[in-house]
Image (cartoon, rainbow, N blue to C red):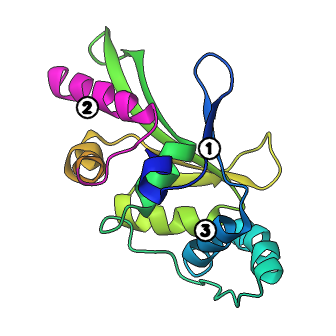
Amino acid sequence: MIKKKFGFGQVTKHGPNAYRWSVTKNEHLRLLCLLAKDNVVLNHRQQQLAAWCDFFGLQQNVQTKFPPLLTTGWLSGFIDAEGCFYIYRCKDKRYKSLQLKYRFILDQKDGFLLFEHVRCTLAGTFYRRKETENVFRYMAQSKMVFRTKLLPYLRRFPCFTKKRVEVFRWHRDLILNS
């Protein structure tokens, strides 16, 4: 799909279920750099892109603000790369029965500012993970947030990887078990 959209690059198979789109021609790499240079918001990605901009003699405009999350596809792409959707059973002490619980998770190194922005938009919580160095985790468990914000957003800006199937299953289970 990416190759078709851009009209260049090569797609090769890596393993039983993985594919890679690669671009090797300088003119095509320059086009990708032009597309990305003013639109990258994560600090470590800006630093990676700076080397490309230097190579192609392009001025990089560093973004200091995160995009509006529910009106652009940015969050969907981030979820495709970093998101996890969990459904698990746990004992409900009040009713002495098993209950289905839903959890949405994002992890990101140096993600404090990003997850503060996500929390302000979607609710939920975030914290620094103890077992890692400066990796933050955003987590939401509210069915109301899923129904009113996250799932409508993902219908408008769907994921393109296998996460699309995970989102569908999660949505189906959330509706059936409500």
Residues rendered magenta in the picture = 156-178
Which residue is labeled 2 in the image?
171
Tag nearer the camera, 1 or 3: 1
| Separation (CA) of disc 3 from disc 2 | 34 Å
Task: Nearest to the eye among marks 1 and 2: give it.
Answer: 1
User: Image check: 33 left or right of 176?
Assistant: right
Instruction: Point out the tag, 3 or 2, that comes first from the N-terminus.
Output: 3
- Mark 3: amino acid: Leu
86 inside magenta stretch: no
In percent of the image, x 23 and y 54: which residue is there?
Answer: 156
Q: Are marks 1 and 3 in contact (CB under 8 Å)?
A: no
Q: Nearer the viewer, residue 53 or 87?
A: 53
- The residue type indicated by label 2 comes to His
Judged by depth in the image, the label closer to the viewer, 3 or 2, is: 3
Earlier-in-chain disc, 1 versus 2? 1
Check disc 2 and report its element: helix, strand or loop. Answer: helix
Relative to residue 173, is residue 43 depicted above or below?
below
Tell me where residue 178 appears, x and y as whole percent: 16, 26
**Circle 1 is placed at which residue position?**
10
Question: Which residue matches tag 3?
Answer: 32
**In this rendering, position of residue 42 left or right of residue 126:** right
Could you classify mark 3 by the number of other residues whose Cα lies within 10 Å: few (under 14), some (14-19), or many (20 or more)? some
Quadrant position of the N terminus in the picture: top left
Query: What count of labels does the image hold?
Result: 3
**Contact (Cβ within 8 Å) of mark 3 with mark 2:** no
Q: Quadrant of residue 15?
A: top right
